[in-house]
Structure formats: C-alpha cells, structure tokens
Image (tube, coloured by chain):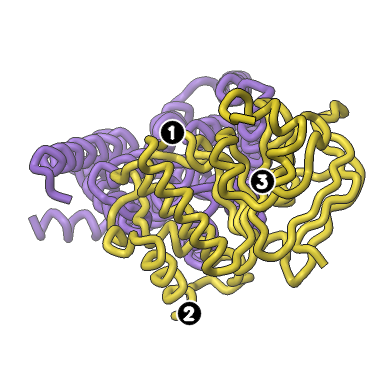
Chain colours: A purple, B yellow
Amino acid sequence: MIDTLAEMLSYPFMVRAFTVGALVALCSALLGVSLVLKRYSMIGDGLSHVGFGALAVAAALNMTPLAVAIPVVIVAAVLLLRISGNSKIKGDAAIALISTSSLAVGVMVISVTTGMNTDVYNYMFGSILAMSEDDVRMSIVLSVIVLVLFIFFYQKIFAITFDETFARATGVRAGMYNTLIAVLTAVTIVLGMRMMGALLISSLIIFPALTSMRVCRTFRGVIISSAVVAVICLVAGIMVSYLCSTPAGASVVMANIAALAVFSAVGALRNRGGIH
Amino acid sequence: MALIKCENVSIGYEGQTVVRDLNFHIDSGDYLCIVGENGSGKSTLVKSLLGLKSVESGRILFGDGLKQNEIGYLPQQTDVQKDFPASVYEVVLSGRLNSRGLKPFYSREDRNQAYEKMEMLGIRELEKQCVRDLSGGQRQRVLLARALCATKKLLLLDEPVTGLDPIVTTEFYELIREINRGSGIAVVMVSHDIESAVKDATHILHLQEKVLFFGTAEDYRKSRVGRNFLGGGQDD
C-alpha cells in the first residue's frame, strides 16, 4: 500500500494531479454548498460547457487555454446568474441553451481545425496528465484567493443563502455576493475542467454538498464536512484512476457516489433511531 | 419626528402603479396593522419600507435614529427555505449582520445578543437544533429572534401567523404584544386576520390601492370602512 503510494508520488504528473485536484475540490465544495441550497446547481454544469467551448477556441487560435477560458467563463457566470434571477425567462431552459450552444461551438471549432482526436476526448472526460507546472501555480494562487474570500465573507454568504430577502433588508449587498460566488465558481470550474472533464466537473460542486446535507444539521457542519468529503473523494478517485487506468473524472465521481450512499445510509439510520 | 413617515408614496411594477398616494406615519411604540384584501399592495409597501423596491413618487422618511437597514423583518413563511441545514443559533445570529459592516466575524456582544433574544422567546434550549426539524410555531419564534437581533426600534412582520394553528397563533400574538409593550419596540404587521389586528393594534392602515383608512384602532372600529370590513362579527 505504502509502496504503491510512494510509486504514485514519484511521478511529477501525479503530484500535480493531486495538488490541483485537491485544491479545486476544496473550493468547489465550499462554493457548492451555497449554489446547491440556492438552487443554482445547473449554473455549474452550464459553466463547464462554456469552458469547453472556450478551451477549443483557445486551442484553435493557439492561445494559452486558461487565459481565454477564465474571462469567457466569468462573463458566462454573471450572465447565467442574471438569467436565473429573472423569473420572466425560463432560467433552466436558458442555461441548457447556452451550455449546448457552447458545446456545439467547441466541437465545430475542433473538428474544423485539428479534427476530432484524443484532445476532444480529454476535454470531455478529463485526463490525469493534463496538469502543467503553470496550472499548478495558477491553481494554488486562485484557490488561496477563493478560500480567503470565502472565509472573510462566510457570514454574509450564509445570510444570503438562507434568506436573501432578509439579508438585503438588513443592508447586505446580495447582488454583489451572488456575483462573487458566480465568479469564484467560474474560476474554479475552469481550473478543474481539464482534469475532471467538461461533462463531469459539476459533480465536484454538487456531490459534496448533497452528501453532507444527509447527515449534518448546521450550516458550518455542512461546509466543513463538504470540504473534507470532497478532498478525500478526490484523492481516492485519482488513486483508483492510477491503479486501474480509468479516466480521472469518472473515478472521482464514482468515489463521490460511494460517499453519498454511505452518508445517506447513516442519515436514514439516524432518522429511524430518532436520535437528534 | 416619527420612526417612519410616508409622504405621497406611490409604488408600482413596470409602470403599473399598485398603490398610490400613501400618507401615514409610525411613531415609537406604535403597533400598526396593515390590512386589506389580496393584491391591495400590502406586500409591495413592505418591500419599499425595507428598501428592496424603490418608490415611483413621494418619499419614505426615517427618523428617531432609525436606519432603513435596522428594521427587524420577519418575512412571509414562503420566502424562507424549510429544508435548510442551519442551526437555530446560526439563524438567530445572522440577524446581527447589519451591525457588523465589513467585519468578517461576530463579536462576543453579537453572540450575547443572540442568546438574550433566544432566552426572551423561550427557544434557548433549541439552540443546537436544525431549523428544518422545528414546528411552524417554533420556526416563527426563531425568525422573530433573528428580527429582534437586527433592530432596537421597529419590527416589520409580513403575515406572520399564516399556516400556524389557532393555539400557536394566539401565543404568537401575545408574544408580539409583550414585545411591543414591554420593550417599547414599534410593530408593523401585515395581516389577514382583521379581528385580532383590531384587538391588539393601536393603529390601523387599510389599503385598497390607496389609503382607505389610517388612524387609531378605536376610530377604525367606528368608521364605515372598518365596520364593513369587520363584517357581521360586530354587534353594533
């Protein structure tokens, strides 16, 4: 066991995968609690598809992938938030529209330029080999920013997640914090996308929050539990991916499914036992 | 100077005026009930008092040291998520946000205030409970404690007893009356329950797109609009 672990960590690409993966999982779990409770889960999914389109265009234009994808996805995040906040437009339909359109643009651009090859496959389903030194540095910087902002604004994020009307009535600028959450989510998604895959990255946002809510009864408990569960599942998933040569993204999602099953069982047992 | 004074206020949505030419005021210690039929503009007025919706014309003035973000607001039940993982303590404490400014963490004073309000409303032993496990009456007390944490001067309650059973409703009204008389906090309550409103309130504001009546509860009972609205329940 320890030998296998040592062997894994002797490969630089594995160290990079663990580092970036754990940081991205941590950030998306924290943001995910708020997004799931505010019924904005679909935004995460929509953003990853926009990210796919942006990456494809960046590759075609021979530009740095993240330099293109991050601004594009941030703009999309703000836009999607506006759409969801506006009850007149059907928010879920609009998100589906934007995400499929971006996917289509991405696929068209790739097929015209480089052709449908393994790159496309990697974008869609993620690759453990995708992380470069630059990506690691960028992930560390951005994750620290996300964590600091999250801790600094934790009380306000709780207030607008629980009851936005009350928060606004007591002078919290809810619109600003919603935008902040969306922007941080956008950055996190772009960072994690190439490893997890455009189709699977939103699982990092949704699973840990839902898993923790099976058992935890306080907001702080859900936040801490989500962070821990997310990192453990990510590490487990990447180990499975390495040992069984399965795609990284899918392996991490499998680990998350297992965690959800365990937590649901614990929650159900506790409810039946009547223990509070 | 009144706590809140509305001068010729009109409010509407996208050019369509919902309420027009409102003139009324709320003084320290008042217990004002806002009554009227569905769609008469009660909730719209509440939003404007809280600063969530701007007025089309007229002015809403705040006095006696009351700031707009220091109103203790108890929202309609439907606005609060029922299946939310948060403890009673977390929810009550969030009422203190308006006195925090940009400071990220709560002080000892904030925590003491939260405990004091929980004690006052008899929910101290529920402190660690999850809000989704509470009964309707308990949940309203939690939200009331949060509202009290946010204000020293004025509570604004938007149909607070909707969905509560009769016994809990009576208890809740008693609680509001005690807070109003005991702590001298002014109360503004939007209500469907006209009978109780007239019994407890010192003032009534009857809305029907405009002000049908504004004055003391006693005068309201004698007025034509009041007698009509109170209906057959009254002997005279």
Which residue is drawn at the image coordinates 86% and 39% (left, top)?
Answer: B10
Is A76 displayed left or right of A215 in the figure?
A: right
Secondary structure beneath dot 3 equals helix
Residue found at the far bottom of this picture:
B108
Tags 1 and 2 touching, CB below 8 Å: no
Which residue is drawn at the image coordinates 64% and 35% (left, top)?
Answer: A85
Q: Which mark is residue B109?
A: 2
> Along the line of sight, which residue is nearer the eye, B79 or A155?
B79
Give the alpha-carbon distance from disc 2 to disc 3, as whole Å.
42 Å
Subunit of label 2: B
Q: Amino acid at mark 2?
A: Glu
Give the alpha-carbon distance from disc 1 to disc 2, as whole Å.
34 Å
Tags 2 and 3 touching, CB below 8 Å: no
Which residue is drawn at the image coordinates 49% and 31% (left, top)?
Answer: A42
Asked if both marks, 1 and 3, belong to the same chain, the answer given is no
Identify the residue under disc 3: A71
